[in-house]
Image (spheres, rainbow, N blue to C red):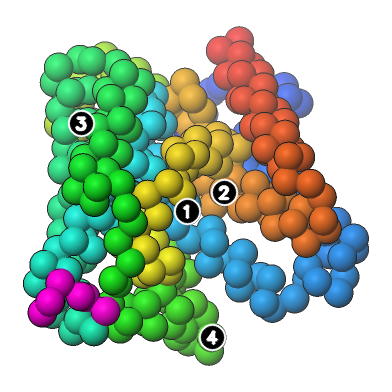
Amino acid sequence: MSEPAGTGVETVGLPERTLWQRLSGVSTLWIGIVLILLYIGFSIWKPDAFPTRFTLQTLLIETSVLLVLSIGMTFVIITAGIDLSVGMVLIFAGVIASKTMEWLSPGGDATHAGWGIIAIGFVVSLAGGGLWGLINGVLVARAKIPPLIVTLGSFGAALGAAQLITGGVDTRTVPESLRNSLGFGTLLGGIPDLVLVALVVTLFGAWLLHTTRFGRYTYAIGSSAEAARRSGIGVTRHLVLVYLMTGLLSGLAGFMNLAYFGTTTIAGHGTDNLDAIAGVVIGGTSLFGGVGSVVGTVIGVFIPSVLRKGFVIAGVPVFWQPIAVSLVLVAAVWFDQNRRKSREK
């Protein structure tokens, strides 16, 4: 019996694949080449500003939060689902974490809060994100409401709850210890702490998706939920866990965002959900489910980031940035559709 689609395992006895099928089977390689060419292109265009350690470091830091969101989104999309709420859940998690730390601090000022209070804020951030993920999962898997509708509702509800808690005003009393460590700290020879956290999440996501039963079930459900159910997989339970994990990662991203910016940035994440989806799809994960990889997501997330950073350094008007990203996204979806058609022949 063949492995679930997207696992990269070849099966014996299948007809020889066409050239298009062979090319589409290595889509991660091609998007990797695109990323390298973009980096080389901007380096040639602006050799004094783009290929520098400072630019690379800021590029990695600015992409870290989005990458954490995108790892969870990868699992959701592989199951043929979608989560439009991740950006607003990020905001909600950051808000309740900051308000909790304020509440526990003398005089309501968390600027000089110790690590005990910071640890509680971290747990609250994860719990807040996990709560929304659990709600999404239950409504999608048990109530059978389309994920687009469920997560669109969560998008508005999470943002509204954050605004109610803060009165629509950003919280700015973030502990200095948190900002100086996770926000701006470095380890292992100058690697930013935020980048290391994103790296750990990425490695865990790759291990979970590509080497465990949980990952195999994720691919199987995305390929055919009914076939997975008939083979004995607890589809309902698994989908709840996938959305729960995505919520937890959104909570982690919210805490990382709080540490870096030193504020809840309520108005700053309106497109995070679309950016995460774009990165995952550009990275080769199929919107139809059953196909995808964490490595592809990493590359896919960095392609728009390199485009934006390169345009800023080159002085290209900001209005061209979403156009370029949109063109790359449409090309990725077109490639995915052709890959899917060739597989079905």
Q: Earlier in the sequence, mark 3 or mark 2?
A: 3
Q: Is label 1 in a helix, a strand or a loop? A: helix
The percent coordinates of residue 107 (x first, y second) are 12, 77
- The quarter of the rendered structure image containing the C terminus is top right
The percent coordinates of residue 48 (x first, y second) are 86, 74
- Residue at x-position 50% and y-position 35%: 274
335 on left or right of 263? right
- At label 2, counting other C-alpha atoms closer than 10 Å, the crowd grade (few under 14, some 14-19, many 20 or more) is many
Q: Amino acid at mark 1?
A: Leu
Count numbered badges in the picture: 4
- At label 4, counting other C-alpha atoms closer than 10 Å, the crowd grade (few under 14, some 14-19, many 20 or more) is few
Q: Earlier in the sequence, mark 4 or mark 3?
A: 3
Residue under label 1, please give it.
67
Residue under label 4, please give it.
190
Measure the C-alpha gap from mark 4 to mark 3. Answer: 39 Å
For the residue pair 162 and 336, the one nearer the viewer reads as 162
Q: Amino acid at mark 4?
A: Gly
Q: Which residues are magenta?
A: 106-111
The percent coordinates of residue 233 (x first, y second) are 19, 27
Q: Which mark is residue 301?
A: 2
Q: Which mark is residue 259?
A: none
Name of the residue lying farthest toward the top: 345
> Is 36 situated above or below 215?
below
